[in-house]
Amino acid sequence: MHKTSGPFARTSIGLALIKPCLKRGRKMARRALEDAKVARDRECIKVGPICRVREDAVAARQRKLDEALAEVRATADPQADALHITPNALRAAKAGAMVAICLAAGYVISLGWGLLFRSPPQTRARRPRSV
């Protein structure tokens, strides 16, 4: 058992189990793409119907590789997993927090500027007292 506890420990344990599977899937997709490219290069000495089929196969395998990489990027956010929210919701929360921090900093700066450089209090001319 790991020394740390809490959701972040569970996330690191889960990612340790998932990473080899994701790595294997990416490796297989890359290998399939390379095989398709080699077959295309072999057939496409002169352009013909078989060459077009090979080019379509390369394009299809490139799309599959892109989808596999996008899936890995989408699921590779341990903070979102630990908080049990989607990665997009976490990004939106981070962006909202940054905006709030910037607005608060602007308010503090303007308040400090106003306190530092305020105009001196206006004095009224006193009327002489009549006795």
Image (spheres, rainbow, N blue to C red):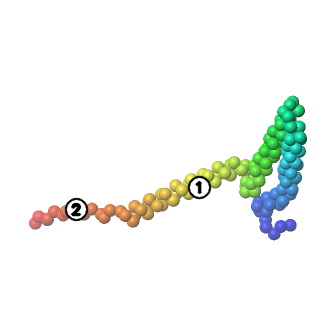
Residue 53 visible to an observer of this rendering: no
Name the mark nearer the viewer: 2 or 1: 1
Quickly name the residue at label 2: 124
Left or right of residue 67, residue 91 in this image = left
Quickly name the residue at label 1: 98
* Label 1 secondary element: helix
* Label 2 secondary element: loop
Residue occupying image coordinates x 86% and y 51%: 27
Decide which of 47, 105 is in the foreground and name it: 47
Left or right of residue 22, residue 94 in this image = left
Residue occupying image coordinates x 84% and y 52%: 22
Q: Position of residue 32 (x, y in %)?
A: 88, 45
Decide which of 89, 30 is in the foreground and name it: 30
Q: Is residue 10 above or below residue 74?
A: below
- Residue lying at the far left in this picture: please name it: 131
Q: Position of residue 107 (x, y in %)?
A: 48, 57
Which amino acid lies under the numbered mark 1 shown in the image of this protein? Met
